[in-house]
Each structure stands twice: as C-alpha cells, then as structure tokens.
Amino acid sequence: MQPGLFVPAVSTVVSLTLLCGAAFTEVPRYPVLVPLTGFLSLEGTSQRNGAVMALEEDASVAYEVHDTGTSPEVAVNAMERALRDRIHTGAIIGPILGTQMLAMLPLAEEYGVPLVTISGTAKLTEMGNPWIFRFFPGDAVTKVAHARYVVEELGRRRPAILYQTTAYGQSGRGQLETTFRSLGAEPVYQEGLDVSVKDMTPALSKAMAARPDVLVLHMHSGPTALLIRQARARGIDLPIVAGSAMHQPSTAALLEPSELKDVCAETGASPISGGSPEMERFTAEYRQKFGSDPDAFALAQYDATRMLLLARHAGATGDAPLRDWLARSEYKGLAMTYRSDGKGNMAHDAVIVCYDGETRTPHIVQRYEGVDLAN
Amino acid sequence: MEFLQLALNGVALGAAYALVALGFVLILNATGAVNFAQGDLVAAGGFVAVALAGILPAPGYLLLPLVAILMAALGLAVSAVAYWPLRDRPPVAVFISTIALGIIIQNGLNGLFGAEPRAAPPLFAGGQLEFFGLVIARQSLSIMATAALLIGAVQLLLTRTQLGRRLRATAQDREVAAALGIPVGAMIALTFALAAALAGAAGMLLANRYFITPTHGTDFIVKAYIAVVIGGWGRIGGALAGAMLVALFETVVAAWADYAVATGLLYVAMLTILVFRPRGLFGEAEGRRA
C-alpha cells in the first residue's frame, strides 16, 4: 500500500472517533471530498495529501476523507453524508473536478457552508455563489501567463497548440487562443487529442507541416509525457511550453532529462523547485509523510486548508462569519498571497518552470503576479 | 515515406492490441461470455512489470516470462471469482461480474501503485533504429516480434497439441467435450490463465512505449471489442486483423484527418462492415453475442 494511503485511512478512523465525541467537545470537522479513484485520482490524491497535511498540523480539529470518484452524483452524495448532522462542520474541502463542484454548489448555498476547491473550471466563480472559494489559479491566470511567456519571453509567434478534448483541455485552449491573438501571435495549428490516443505521430506531423516555431501543450499528465517523448524521438527540437501537468514530478519521471531540454510549463507553484526555507520544509515533510514529491495541487490545497484554520483561530467560526472572513482577508501562503477578487477567486499568480536537460527538477524562470486582477 | 512511417507505427501499436484482442477471443470462445476485465488485466500486467522491475533489476526480456506467469495466476483467480460461481447462469451474468471485477482491479491498482502514469522497462535497450529513411523505436520492433511470437505460439498450442484440441473442443461445445471426458472446468480455467498471460504481455509492452495508469484498461477493452466485432465474433484471425485496423485508423487515418474524425471514421467503417458482412470480416465462430 502506498504510504500516502495508510495515513488518511488511519486518520479517518481517528477522526471518526473524535466525531463520536464531537457533540460534547465541539471539535470542528473538515470533510475532505476529493477524487481518489478514476481519471483525476492523481490530482485528487495530491489534493487530499495537501489538506491532510495541514489538518494534522492542528490538533484541535478533525477531518474525514471521502472519495468522490468521477461522477457528480457520488460527490453530491458524499457532501450530503458529510453535512447530514451539520455538527460543527468548519468548511467543505471540495474536489478538483469541475463537474462535481458545479453539482455541489447549490448544496453549499442551501446548507450555507463554505466550499473550498482548487478546481480550475471558470464557471464555478461566475455563478454568483458567495460560498465558493478557489485557491488554484484558473485559466484566466495560468493560460494568460502561458501565452505571455511564449510570446514575450521566448519571442515565438507561430505556436502550434495541441490540447486534450476534455472540458479541461477545451477550456484552456480557448483562453490560449484568445491571449495569443491579443498578443499578435496567430496559432498556426490546433488539434484536440482524446486521452486514449497512444500514437501522437500523426498530430506532430500535421503540426510540423504548419511550420510552427513553438509547440504549446495543454494536456493531462500521461499524454503530455507521451507527446514530448514522441516529439523528441522524431527529432523535433522546438521549444515545448506545456500546461501545468508537466510540472508534476510524476510526469517528469516518465521522461529522460535529455528529453526535457527546452521544455517549460506553466503552473501555480513548483514546490520541488524550492525558493524559500518554508517551501523546502514543506517539501521535505510531504516526502516523508507520503513518500512522493508534492506538486502545485498539493501545495494549493495545503495553503487553502491553512487559511481555513487561520480563520478559525482568528475567531471566524460559524458559516457566514467564515465566508465573510475568507471573502475579505488576505493570506500569505507558501505558493502565493491569496485574496478574493469578489467572486471567490483567491489565486492570481502563476509561474513558468523550465527544465535544463540535466535533471528532472524544474527551475522557476518567470513569475506572473496578479494576472487576472490586472485585467 | 511519411505514410510508411505512420503505417509502421500503426503495425507496432496493432501488434500490442492484437494480444489484447486474442485473450478476449479465447475467453469468449471458451465461456460464450465477454470478459470485460480483459482491459484491466492489461493494465495489471503493466503494473506487475513496473513492480517486478523495481524488485529485480533484470532486462525486460527476462521479466516478460515472470509477468506472464504471475498474470496467468491472476487469470486463474479471475476465473474462480468471476466465472466459476456463475458458470450455469446466462452469459450476461458473467459479463456483469467481469465488469465488477475490472473495477475492483482498477481500484486495487490505484490503491497499490497510485494514480501516476508509470513506464515499464523496455524488452531490450531503448533508443531507435533508422533504415531506408524510416525511424522505428527498438521497443516497437520488440513489440512486433514478441506479439508475432506469442500469437504463433498460441496458434501452435491450439492446433498442434492435445491440450489445444481439448481447449478447442471445450470452446466449441462444452457438453459434448465433458461427455468425451475432457475436464471442461480445468480447460476453461486454463483459458483464463492463457488470456491473462497474453494481457500481461501486452500490458508490459504497452506500458513501456505508451505508459500505463490504473484507468487505462477501459481504453484497451473498447479497442479489443471493436477489433473482435470487425473481425468476426470469436474468430482469432479476425480479431488480429481487427486490431490492426483499429491501430491503422489511429495512425494513418489520423494523419489525414483530426483524431476525432478518424475515430468517427473507424466507427463508420465498423458499421459498414457489419452492414455488408453482418458476421464480421471473417465470419462468426460461435454465433453467440453477449
């Protein structure tokens, strides 16, 4: 069993034990509802680990972990279960999967409980629901940074965009295309790839026929690695600027360092790249606790959960006071400083990381702060 | 030249799909039911290879037989759990139980190995070869050679050995086979073991070239199903041809049209074949569909 799985399993039991006495001791609890199975289980596991790490640093709270799988119904059922008795629920830590979050939003409003997520789905914070708080930069931040780095820093103006046909992929592609055009760089080729595609040579052939000067990817982890490997095997030595999946240590682990030369990625943060003693301490503790490297999703969820706990210690207990505190406060987390834009978007910064072709550890080469706030 | 390059890639991919489809057909013929866990057994094979490579720092060609043996044992377990208790029920009961077992395998892999994509070791050295302007990865050549070897071995087993004749007799008519003294239960269990070993080999080969995650099994079972429908329900040769066709649509046709269009065209081709040859390209072996 993975080291990371044992801890939450035990912690859930411990938490449930605590819950038995919750009515008497008023221990606040934080249900962690994340996808631990299905196609987003990699990101969901990072989310769980980040939340669990923060929650276990505070002995005065309890938590429980529920797997939301991949369907909205399972997520809604998990939320209903978590809120059934409504005893001292601090806030709900919701899944990264946008379709699940959309289904959970009405419940958050109905029960009046803050819902904290790292989902990038733009619509979540555009529905006027005051109970949602998103702690990971959405496409309006990361894809703008992505396109700006390509045009402003690399000086490339003929991007070929390869994206996934999932909702995630199409949403990012739209933002990339809009930003490239606004920067005067017309994409010379665009194609959507299903996640089940194994041989990406046809897409690479068509993209190269359009004579691009950079390959821009917005794909999930495995397909990103697959495309980079197949591009390098074909002798394509163009710079590749990928989406946030590339920054995940598990993606880089699939490739040889030499294949990563001239590969960059956008992301909210890159814990393994270091940058501060606090970040390095977080990374070391995460590795020790879960036996794997943290990614930006784990760090964002850690920061989000830490902000929730800070709110409690600042006296913002109860649903509406917590919501209002989150909406008006600023929190300096490890990844960035979080503050709401009035719609519940808390994260406004992005970074670009690049690999040097010698190691699998990326270096932060560019920071973009307050991207959507500036717009 | 570009066409030849893409066709070569398609044949390498099709060779691995053929192993998946072959295991699928063997169980279909032996039990009359679809084994929907076959794709998840492919994923399991990939992860077994990843785990073995972590324990035994041996070359891939030495790990492959170990993967096949371990997967054969898993195949026996699958037959005991998903088939044996339901053997006297309609085929639909078995295919539902294999769906459930596939989900269990998928979540089990997730729990044991995590959700990260993994790469199995190559059979021989990595890198690629160039000849006549075509570039091919050594692993792709290994996939084609291994698939040809395994498919040939299965064909020899089924056609040239007493055991193979018993397996075929069981597949053709279980009641008559039992009346002739053939241990039908053992033959079916052996078929599951053989199919799982083939799935394991496919998983190891695919996991190096294309990576593997616990959820990849779903992709493989869909492709195997299409290959078998195109080739002819229960036809081994048909399944192999169907697997090649699926892979060529993913490579050659996708180079001419978008992937989404190529996928659509694959389904149009399948429907066209079924209109003009309702029993598939090679006819139907059993005449039973689950």
Image (cartoon, coloured by chain):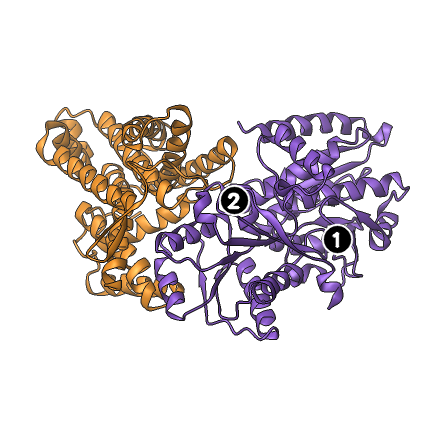
Chain colours: A purple, B orange
Residue B150's quadrant in the figure?
top left
Q: What amino acid is found at the position of numbered circle 2 in the picture?
A: Gly
- Is B135 drawn above or below residue A191 in the view shown? above
Q: Residues within 10 Å of mark 2 (few under 14, many from 20)?
A: many
Mark 1 lies on residue? A133
Q: Can the viewer see residue A108 in this picture?
A: yes
Residue A61's quadrant in the figure?
top right
Task: Tell me the element at label 1.
Answer: strand
Front of the two marks 1 and 2: 1
Q: Can the viewer see residue A127 in this picture?
A: no
User: Residue A304: x percent and y percent?
Assistant: 74, 45
Residue at x 54% of width, y 41% of height = A37
Front-lying residue, A28 or A361: A361
Q: Is residue A25 left or right of residue A269?
A: right
Residue B47's quadrant in the figure?
top left
Front-lying residue, A237 or B107: A237
Pointer 1 chain: A
Mark 2 lies on residue? A38
Residue at x 37% of width, y 24% of height = B56
Q: Is residue A8 left or right of residue A355?
A: right
Pointer 2 chain: A
Front-lying residue, A240 or B108: A240
